[in-house]
Every structure is written in C-alpha cells, then in structure tokens.
Image: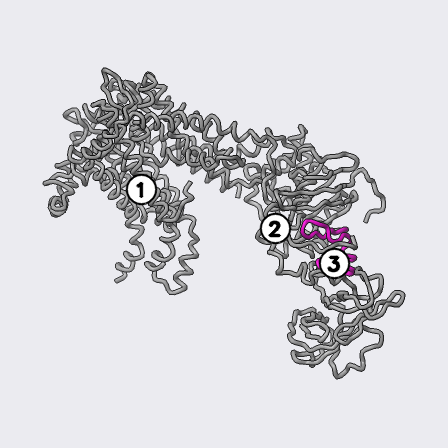
Amino acid sequence: MRTTHDHGGDVRLTRISKTYGGFTAVHPLDLTVPQGTFFALLGASGCGKTTTLRMIAGLEEPTQGTVHLGDQDVTHLPPYKRPVNTVFQSYALFPHLDIFENVAFGLRRRGIKNVRKQVEEMLDLVQLGEHARKKPHQLSGGQQQRVAVARALINHPKVLLLDEPLGALDLKLRRQMQLELKRIQTEVGITFIHVTHDQEEAMTMADTVAVMNAGRVEQLGSPTDLYENPKSTFVANFLGTSNLIEAEVDTRSGDEIVLKAGGCKLSLPRARCSAPVTAGGKVLAGIRPEKISLTHADDAGRVPEGRNRLTGTITASSFIGVSTQYMIDSPACPGLEVYVQNLDRDARLVPGAEVVLHWDPAHTFGLDAAQDIDAGVEGVEPDEGVAA
Amino acid sequence: MAFVNWLKRNLVVIAGLLTLGYLLLPNVVVMVFSFNKPKGRFNYQWQEFSTDAWKDPCGVADMCGSLALSLQIAVWAMIGATLLGTMIAFALVRYRFRARGVVNSLIFLPMAMPEVVMAASLLTLFLNMGAQLGFWTILIAHIMFCLSFVVVAVKARVMSMDPRLEQAAQDLYAGPFQTFLRVTLPIAAPGIAAGALLAFALSFDDFIITNFNSGSTVTFPMFVWGAAQRGTPVQINVIGTAMSVIAVLCVVIAMVISNRRTRQKA
Amino acid sequence: MAALTRAPAPPAPAGPEQRPPRRRGRLTPYWLLLPGLLWLVLFFVLPMVYQASTSVQTGSLEEGYKVTWHFVTYWEAVSEYWPQFVRSVLYAASATVLCLLLGYPLAYLLAFRAGRWRNLLLVLVIAPFFTSFLIRTLAWKTILADNGPLVGALDALHVLDVTSWLGWTSGDRVLATPLAVVCGLTYNFLPFMILPLYTSLDRIDPRLHEAAGDLYARPFTTFRKVTFPLSMPGVVSGTLLTFIPAAGDYVNADLLGSTDTRMIGNVIQTQFLRILDYPTAAALSFILMAAILVMVTVYIRRSGTEDLV
C-alpha cells in the first residue's frame, strides 16, 4: 500500500442503504476506500455489491445515506456530473462508434476539442493503437475489455469502478487481464473499486477486500488477513475452503483456549477466536485444508508433540497434480478436506486407510457456533455466471 | 437411384424455388406487358412489341398527377406515423406506467382488424363530422393504420438494446439530451428506419382505406382501380416496372456498399 | 466488524441488481404516449363507436338518420348476406392453408439451405411489394386468361374437368371462378406468411437438426418433432397475418372473380359507396369485426402463443 495518503480522493459511504419495495439490497453501510488503493467488493450474486458500486457511480440513488468523494458530497449528483468512471459488465461499448470514438466519447462530452493525441496515447497504453478504426464487434473479448478500460481511464477519474470486468473472458485471458489491470492501476495511481464474485480474482488484485453477504459487509481486510483469519463462517467458506469442526470449550488459560471435539483436544490461540468463549460453550474450530498434515495410523507415534491431532478414515482421494485432495471422516467431524503436497507420496494413504490429521495450533481459528455452518459454501448460492 | 436421392435431398429447395416463381411471375408479366401495344382499351393480351409507353410514361391523363399525390401522402404519412410511433415505442420499452395493457391492445388492434372495417368506420366518422373527404382524410387514415407497424418495428429494436449503453454514456459525462442524441437515437436508428420504410410502403400502396375515404381525390392505387374498370393503359405497367426496378436497385446497391465496408474493415 | 450477526438470506436475490435506474421525470412516458394514443383514439376507437351507433339507426339519406336501437338491421344483414360471410371465411381459410403449404418450403430454404444466396433470395421475396399490388393482381388476369397458355395446358391435362367437378372452376374458364379468387388471395398475402415463418425458422439452431439425427430421427421425423414445433410462433403469426386481411379483402374478388364469388368485403364496399345504405353496411362491418376477433382469440388461445405483440 502507498505510504502517502492524500485524503482528498477517498470514497466515503456513510450509512448508505438501498431498498426496492420490500427488499433491502444494501443494509446501512459505512465504508471508506482510501485514495490510490485497489479495493474489491466480493460476494455472491444478489449480495448488494453491484448496487453499492452503482450508487457510487450515480446510476442508482441511495434510499438513505451519503456518498462523498473527498470532501464533496456527490449523493445527489447525476452520473454525468461525477468525476467517476465505470468499466461495465460486458463492457457496454457503443456499437455504432469505432474504437477511437468510443475512447474519445467522454472527452468530447466535456467539450475538449483536440482529443487525437490523448486518445492515441491511451490506445497505446492498452496496446490497441492499430485497431482505432475498427468497430467493437470486430475485436476479441480481451480487446473489448481493454477498450472499456481505456474509455474510462482517459477521463482521469478520481475513482474507476469495475463491475465484473473479467466475467466474460475465459480463464487464461482472465489471469492475464488481472495482472494487466493491476499493472495499469499501479501506473496511474487511481483508486480502483472492483466488484467480483470470484474470490481468487479479488485476492490476486486487490489491496483491500470487502466481503459482502445479503446486503452487508461481512469482513474487510487485506486478502491474507481475510484468508488466514476469517471472522465468520461465510468468509471462511466463501474464500477458499475451510474445515469447520463443532467443538466445546474445555479450558481457558491466558492466550490459549482448549477445545474438545469427538474425544480429541484442540488448541486455539485466544487472539484467533472471534466467538464469545464461555466454559462448556460451543465454538467452531476452523482449519484450512492445506495446513493439515496426514500420517498413517501405523506411524502415529512419529507425530511431533504440541500439534492438534484428530483421527479419521480416508473415504476418497483425488490426484490434482501439485497436490492430492483427501476426504476424511473423523469422529470429531465427518467430511474433512485435506490437501497434501505431492512431495513424498505415502502409498498407504488410500481410501479406507486409518490416518492421523495434525496441524500447528497457531493455524486454527475460532468462530461463533451460532452461525450457519454452511454459509458461503459453493453451490448453496445461485451461480453468478448466469445472473448479475 | 442417385437422381432419386438427389431429388429427395433437394425437394425442399425445389418447392421453395417454385413458390418464389409463383411470387415473381406477375412482376415478370407486368414488365413484359409494359412493352405491349394492345388493340383495345385493356392491356391483358399480348399483341406486339413496342416501347411507346416507355417513351411517354405520363401520356395518360391524370396518372402522373395521382402518382405525385400518392408519393406526397406517403411521405407525410411516413413522417407522422414514424414520429408518433417512435414516441410510443420508447414509452413502452423504457418506462413503467399504468394502463400498459390497454396501450398494448390499442396498438395491436388496428393490425388485427380487416382494413375494410377500419375504412368503413372512419368513413362513418368523417360523414358524421361533415368532413370534406380528400387529401387530409386520406392522410389522417394512413397515419392511423401505419402507426402500429412503426411501434412494432421500433419497439423490437429498442428492446434488444443494452440499457448499460445509456448508463455508460451518462457515466462518460453525457447529459440526458446528449445521451439520447449520441447513443440512443443512433442505435435505435435501424429500427426507426425500418418502421419508416414500412409506413411509406403501406401508405403508398394502400387501396382499401383510401377507397373509402378519398372522396373524389385520386391516388395512384385509386387510378389503377379506376383503370381496371374503364381500360388499362400500358403506362401503368411502365410505372409498376420502374418502381420495382428502382427499389431493387437501391437495395442491391445498399447491400454491395455494406458488404464492401465490412470486408474493408475486417 | 467482529460482532457480525448471521444474516438470513433475502427472499429474492439477483433481481434488483439488474433493474434499470429509476427515471427522474415521472410524467415523461405519458407525454410520449399522448399524441400517438390521441390519434388512435380519435381515428380508430371513436370511428368504431360511430359505426356501432350507425348500425342501430334508421332513416334515409334525405331525412337524416336517428338512433332507434333498430337491432333488426343485424338480423336482416345476416340473413341476407350469410353466403358472402361463409364464402369469405372459406376463401380466406383456403388461401391461408395454401400460403402455409407454399410458404413453408421457401421460408425453410431461406433459413437453412440458401447459404450465400440468402440475401438475394430475401430481396426477391420482398421485391414484388415494390410494385403496386393492384397492378400485380391485374397481371393475374393475363396469366389466367381464357385463351392463355396456362389455362390451355390445364384444359389439355383435364385438370379443369376435375376442378369444375369440385365447383372450383366453371367450364374451361379459370378467371371469374373461386379458384382465381383464392389464387389471387394466396398470391397477395404469401409474403405475410413467408416473413414470420422465416424469422422463427432462422432462430432455430441448425445443430438441433444434427442432434435429432444423432438421436435416430429420420429427416422427416426431425422436421415433425423438432423444426415444426419450434417454428410454431411463425406459423401462428403468419396464418393470422394472412387470414385477417384475406377475410376482409374485396379487391381480388372484384378483379379476378364474378358476381358468384362476392365476399363480405365487396358487400360492405357497395353498401357504403354505391347503395349508401349506411346502417346495413355498418352492421355488416361490425359483424365481420366481431367474427374475426372471436376467431383470432380462440385461435391464439388454442395455439398457446399469446405474446405475439
């Protein structure tokens, strides 16, 4: 992140909300996006992320609350009077204008006469110089995407809004454009607010990610922070995969909480538990699949002391290449997932084998057991690909 | 056997081409008979080749006058129906309002009504009002029945338009008027043009409604109708042939130009 | 942030994000609608009202007409002109069926088999429109002329004997017979059948044919089970666009027919423009309108495509 902060360009949302008839798309929300950051709004379809973005763009009027750009209250300004530009989902390039005129559109509307040099420079920045006189439908998806970015950036907006900008591209092009967008953002230093349902995309590109669910921000932080230290089951499940084990609080001592699950004791650092802890109360103990090591039950004695341990039976395994993924039923919790890097493969680890799962207690996180344990699990939410 | 198989595979093509022949046969006859030199008053039987009619296309009393009148009415009807119809189409696609269903059926009904019914009822109205039948009553009637067709043509185009395009224009500093002028109108233009062309063609070629509401004013279809009773001059065929040749040429030229353009760009 | 509560899933997700933005001027749609609708109300709805009123008036041209709720006019109109009504429906229905039979192969050819000739063929389908339909209808007088080559050939092949026996033609003439009128109607409204058919066929993914073939359907079964059902919207709107104007037409019956082929349109036209019996004419026109609206409604309901507009 940048060290110098010019607060004149911060985006500030204050108690902003949006309701349609009886349906609340966005619950009252406070959010500050510091100038110059790459900020991502992440969530499944219908979570309110696009509505939030459109309220910043001025395409949607908030039911309540205000939008500030720096010190200016822009809540009631129409979109064409806001120093904000948008890269639309599926780009919304004007089909009747060529690439040059698409990029020049914003400049011309603001009464700027000599646009040629600026437009050509901009097209060079996105490497489309030789396509200036083509119509949008003659370009590939990736090229259209770059035109959409150029068309917005040429206006030097205070904030660039990106609404699922990579949704229409195939996987390989998507990876490439993620890096490209990141490069452009670093180069121009403009605040980017990026809406996406793809957690990997958000984590690769953004400095700060806000995870939204059902019209609220569930958690906000850096990608590592969100991944390593989720504060709700939704975040734990929506970003990557988590094993959530229902456990009972056994003892508390200083920085350590000891939990009981299926006859095993698990240690959890106090600082990594977001749930209220009372003796005998319930807590969800979380652990990421790649943090777990597997040892065959015959070698149980070789597991080092001081690690959290569970026993279980392998029910399924699949070879992925870089890793092997196992499904394991444990008395503490059925259906645990474990990813093991393919360094020295143990030939005994096949379905049916008895194993010991063990991990560094510092990787455990604790969540409030009063939540839906499956919130944010893929497949529960409707797929974004079709809608939004 | 090979021939039978070929026939089987291409049966639909042969049938289709036969239908096309059925559609085009009268045009061929009209063209051929524009070079006829008939003996009596009617131009239904081939006598001998002659280019007399082509040399003097306006040689029949009142015919070219009626043609000019038809063109004039068609242009005004096109302008009126396109303007009113485009406005309705935009309102229907872009806004939510009450009584949508009523508006939709009011648009649909004139298209689901035999022309003779509309023609007769309009005449009843004009007679009751004591209106003078002529240019204005024809124009009023033509705008009325062309309106719905324009609405349908424009609506289809505007509906298929991505609403994000207008939002993008607004996002890029175009106010409501600029957005309409620079984005909405150009993108809706093909639909509006199609509606306008349809209105022109419908009005120009209309007979039934005009027949009821023209009084003693004679449009080109009215002239042809009258000629069918009294005697058909060869010049009618000349005009009919010229119109279709000009129109087809225009279409072909437009197609060639657009083809070349896309080929250059690609 | 730490004390986030569980949020229950909203009842209707995904919807609101795509809604168009609320427009600022609420009266705008009404201003846009006003002139056009006013036109339709004044010159389409109001005339219907006048016509309804005229149909129950009595009087004469000299003394003027008065509303006397004289519904007998309707009864008299039906009892006197029912043959013309029946004939109109019969001719229009025959023309519609013929249009479907003739138009379908051409629409199919345009949609699936035309390749690079498609645009040219489309121009040729529309080309006849550019010549006044009255002139083209008159051309049929030449084509079907009594001593013309077509009638001569049909006569030589004894086709005319069969059609005469069926009552479609009389003697060795085609002109001035029902066959000529139906032939003219078919010709005039054929493009109105072909274009909707083509539009709906063109939307069909050709891979569906391959898929059907892959699943053991012979070409004709593919047509019956896949292509034809998918083209139903075109069939429905095509038949309506053909039947409605054909039922009210009087041009073909007048130019190509005789007094024995008069359709209801001819009656309305003469009553209105020559005999000047306005109440009878208005009543006839009203009955025609009602009959067509009823038939169309039933037809649309039964074919299950109500979203034609």
Residue for point 72% across, 35% down: A74
Q: Residue B214 at what x, y percent from top left? A: 30, 21
In the rendered image, which residue does mark 2 sit on?
C13
Magenta region: which residues?
Answer: A208-234
Answer whether residue C24 is magenta in the image: no
> Rounded to the nearest whole Å, what is the CA distance between mark 3 and mark 1?
63 Å
Q: Chain of mark 1?
A: C
> Rounded to the nearest whole Å, what is the CA distance between mark 1 and mark 2?
42 Å
On the question of residue A367 being in view, the answer is yes
Answer whether residue A215 is magenta in the image: yes
Q: Residue C121 at what x, y percent from top left? A: 35, 43
> Rounded to the nearest whole Å, what is the CA distance between mark 2 and mark 3?
21 Å
Q: Residue furthest right?
A: A254
- Of the residues shown, which amino acid type is indicated by label 2? Pro
Placement of C107 over or under A338, stated as above or below: above
In the rendered image, which residue does mark 3 sit on?
A232
Placement of A321 over or under B242, stated as above or below: below
Residue for point 47% across, 31% down: B86
